[in-house]
Amino acid sequence: MLWLAAVCACWVLHKNFARRSISADAIGIVAVSTVAGIVGAKLWHVLETPQLLLASPAAMLFDRSGFAWFGGLLAGILALMWQGRVYKVGPVGMLDLSAPAAAVGYAMGRLGCLTSGDGDYGIATNLPWGMSFPNGLVPTTERVHPTPIYELIAGLLIGWILWRRGASEKPIGQLTGEYLILTGIARFLVEFIRINPRIYWGMSNAQVASMGSVIFGGLLIVWAKRRGLKPVSPPVDAAVGPRS
């Protein structure tokens, strides 16, 4: 499922490069960012419980479950910014170009959470689409909210919105800010029905990180609009004007 997520993200990023006439290797960019994201997601997860990490470091680091989205997001952002310099589109410019692809890739990756039953599901429910995971990595025989499906739908919707938004010129950084706000809101809301423990002020760790994502995204949009820098290469449609 990680492979499927990477392929889908690569296709969206390639299409975004094509409509802006940017010569860049979408496959290489996604490959580097995916590896960085996986490492970052694992490190974030193990550092959330330092006492368990110190007790059995090998078991924590090499366990095939336990990946935190925000660790992957941070590592992926750093990898993309570095590659933005390599391909001469700028660190933030690369983030803007990758925003729709990241949303789609995240959505498809949630299918892995669903099929493995790794504890990303929600609380018990009587809704007709409730699911149980008796053979999951974190098994349950109760019918629960299939929250990975909710996040799949939300991620695809966010990807579509960002793709449409990117069809016209935006100040550098605005699309990245919108991505952080939309994904932060989606994750904050779904956490209300997930089984993650409440750690801070009745909220889960992911909800606190989501609030930070929304705040930072808003500040980034303000910064982008004040600077008013245009993308290195505008969308082809924007460059040639409206079609009849």
Image: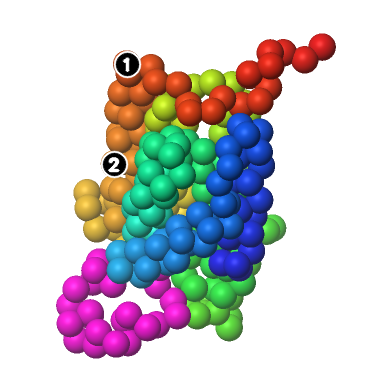
Kindly report the distance in space between the C-alpha atoms of the residues bearing marks 2 and 1.
21 Å
Residue 58 on the magenta span: yes
What residue is drawn where x is 47% and y is 78%? 138
Answer with the quarter of the image where residue 115 lies.
bottom right
Q: Which residue is mark 1?
A: 226
Q: Give the residue displayed 46% in from the left and 54% down from the top.
A: 193
Instruction: Tell me if mark 1 has few (under 14), some (14-19) or many (20+) residues whose alpha carbon lies within 10 angstroms of its own.
Output: few
What's the amino acid at mark 1?
Answer: Arg
The range drawn in magenta is 46-69
Q: Secondary structure at mark 2?
A: helix
Residue 35, compared with residue 178, is above or below; it is below
Q: What SS does tag 1 mark?
A: helix
Above or below 18: residue 65? below
Q: Is residue 111 left or right of residue 73?
A: right
**Residue 229: image x %, image y %?**
39, 20
**Residue 143, position in %: x, y?**
59, 68
Q: Position of residue 152 (x, y in %)?
A: 60, 52
Q: Earlier in the sequence, mark 2 or mark 1?
A: 2
Q: Which residue is mark 2?
A: 212
Return the residue nearer the eye: 235 or 98: 235
Asked whether, in this view, residue 237 is left or right of residue 28, the answer is: right
Residue 45: image x %, image y %?
32, 68
97 or 136: nearer the viewer? 97
Instruction: Identify which residue is drawn at 63% across, 19% down.
Output: 238
